[in-house]
Amino acid sequence: MLGIDIRYESNIDGLKRIPYIVNEFRINPTFVVIGNIPLVLRESLLTKVLEYGIKFVEETKKELPPGVIGPFCLESIVDDNMEIKVFEFSGRIVAGTNLYINGSPYSYLYWNEPMSTGRRLARELKLAIERNTIDKILT
């Protein structure tokens, strides 16, 4: 896991921070994505998030060999009962992994050094070439 983020949507995220009565313009809420904010996840959810990622990789190996290779994101929401609801898969570098220029707290813990998504990809390619296993990480 390289990172987690919150999708910031305008204008709903701004409007929810002010009382409706103060909003004299009576703006209708919209959900246009205008950015992403880095997030350090609540510890009690970390195990679930990691399990979802591992299970997703395992299932893609079964259903579409060799499975997902490279960066991906499980777009999700967490409900009031702390249950994770995955609603979309993105098979690319997305905001949750890309907005950390020097890497996220999670990537630092894993690699023991600053590790952005691009740097991790370059590192994994280099290691695969050195180990003669490039065929295992490319499709």
Image (cartoon, rainbow, N blue to C red):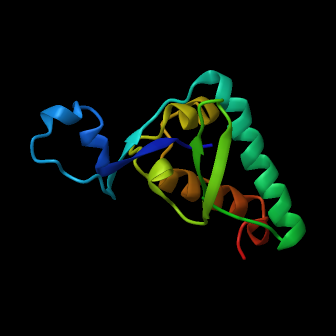
Q: Is residue 65 visible?
A: no
Q: Quadrant of the C terminus?
A: bottom right
From the viewer's perspective, tell me whether residue 96 is left or right of residue 1. Answer: left
From the viewer's perspective, tell me whether residue 66 is left or right of residue 119. Answer: right
* Furthest residue toward bottom: 139
Give residue 76's position: percent from left, percent from top.
59, 49
Task: State the count of labels.
Answer: 0
From the viewer's perspective, tell me whether residue 25 is left or right of residue 36. Answer: left
Asked where in the image residue 127 lies, by quadrant, the reply is: bottom right
Give residue 60's position: percent from left, percent from top.
80, 65
Q: Quadrant of the N terminus?
A: top right
Front-most of 59 and 80? 80
Q: Residue at x 41, y 44 (%)?
A: 100
Look at the picture and state if 39 lies above or below 25: above
Q: Residue at x 82, y 70 (%)?
A: 66
Front-most of 42 and 129? 42
Front-most of 19 and 64? 19
Q: Is residue 66 visible?
A: yes
* Furthest residue toward left: 24
Give residue 109's position: percent from left, percent from top.
59, 29
* Furthest residue toward right: 62
Q: Residue at x 79, y 64 (%)?
A: 133
Give residue 116's position: percent from left, percent from top.
48, 47
Asked where in the image residue 124 lies, by quadrant, the reply is: bottom right
